[in-house]
Image (spheres, rainbow, N blue to C red):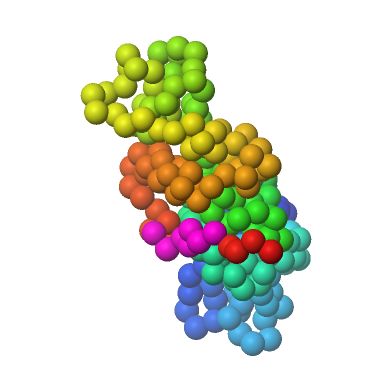
């Protein structure tokens, strides 16, 4: 059975038997991997906390008949403890890894892997508000998957913007001619925030107000649900509280 190495971020784990665990990971080169970590739940396990959710590791695995088996694991990014220590970061990270699990398959996507690792690293370092980091990640992850939203030109006919009506089912903003009857107008600040989150313009995103952040999060969630065909279980638990200014 061939042995291979890869870098991977742990998405979720499940108990197997008395001491083993099934680990679902997004890898750098092999896409999504499900593998068995034998004896990992024992107190003296050589893997320890290296294969917990949100951790990034360099792995050696060998191919099994149904599941691969993890032989070695060396930590590359120890983000789990820092993320778990903050409720807002923890809930945001859970939504991120669930999204990655739903959007990626065995063929792999280096862009998805790098995006997720970067987002988890940012959460662990408290670089930005967790809710903003999550919404930016969701928009970018959907874009990599082929569902890039438009917040400038009309997503239906391409008419140059700006436009102030957003329809998630149509791919973003739409002009007056393409907008379905009854489509509500969206304020410029919220549209600006959505564009900033998609582009990674953190200066503009951090300068946004609480009302715009709340509206933008709702639109991002609706857009995600439309393309995934059902919502994320973890998204309802995400903390949207804005931390107090220092």
Residue sitting at the far bottom: 43
* Horizontal arrangement in the rendering, residue 47 relative to residue 52 (left or right): right
Which residue occupies 59% across, 50% down?
A: 133
Which residue occupies 32% across, 14% down?
A: 177
> From the image, which quarter does the N terminus lie in?
bottom right
Which residue occupies 36% across, 50% down?
A: 231
User: With respect to residue 170, does 194 lie above or below?
Assistant: below
Q: Is the magenta stretch mostly helix, strand or loop?
A: loop
Q: Is residue 61 visible?
A: no
* Horizontal arrangement in the rendering, residue 71 relative to residue 234 (left or right): right
Percent position of residue 208, x then y: 57, 44
Residue sitting at the far left: 181
* Horizontal arrangement in the rendering, residue 76 relative to residue 172 (left or right): right
The front one of 232 and 218 is 218
The front one of 108 and 100 is 100
The front one of 62 and 238 is 238
In the picture, residue 58 is in which quadrant? Answer: bottom right
Residue numbers of the magenta segment:
236-242
Percent position of residue 26, x then y: 59, 52
Q: Can residue 237 be seen in this view?
A: yes
Q: How many numbered marks are there?
A: 0
Which residue occupies 62% across, 67% down?
A: 83
> From the image, which quarter does the C terminus lie in?
bottom right
In the picture, residue 155 is in which quadrant? Answer: top left
> In the rendered structure, does residue 57 fall within the stretch colored magenta?
no
The front one of 59 and 51 is 51
Percent position of residue 22, x then y: 52, 67
């Amino acid at each position: 059975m061939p042995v291979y190495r890869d870098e991977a971020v742990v998405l979720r784990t499940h108990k197997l038997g008395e001491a083993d665990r099934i680990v679902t990971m997004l890898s750098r080169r092999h896409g999504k991997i499900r593998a068995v970590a034998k004896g990992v739940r024992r107190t003296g396990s050589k893997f320890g906390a290296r294969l917990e959710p949100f951790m990034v590791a360099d792995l050696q695995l060998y191919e099994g008949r149904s599941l691969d088996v993890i032989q070695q694991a060396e930590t590359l990014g120890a983000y789990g403890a820092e993320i778990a220590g903050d409720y807002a970061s923890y809930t945001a990270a859970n939504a991120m890894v669930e999204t990655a699990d739903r959007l990626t398959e065995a063929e792999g996507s280096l862009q998805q892997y790098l995006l997720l690792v970067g987002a988890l690293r940012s959460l662990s370092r408290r670089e930005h508000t967790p809710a903003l980091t999550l919404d930016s990640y969701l928009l970018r992850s959907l874009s990599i998957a082929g569902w890039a939203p438009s917040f400038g030109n009309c997503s239906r006919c391409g008419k140059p913007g700006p436009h102030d009506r957003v329809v998630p089912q149509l791919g973003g903003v739409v002009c007056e001619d393409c907008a379905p009857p009854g489509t509500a107008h969206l304020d410029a600040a919220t549209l600006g925030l959505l564009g900033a989150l998609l582009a990674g313009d953190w200066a503009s995103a951090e300068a946004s107000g609480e009302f715009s952040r709340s509206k933008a999060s709702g639109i991002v969630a609706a857009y995600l649900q439309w393309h995934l065909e059902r919502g994320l279980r973890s998204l309802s638990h995400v903390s949207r509280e804005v931390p107090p200014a220092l």
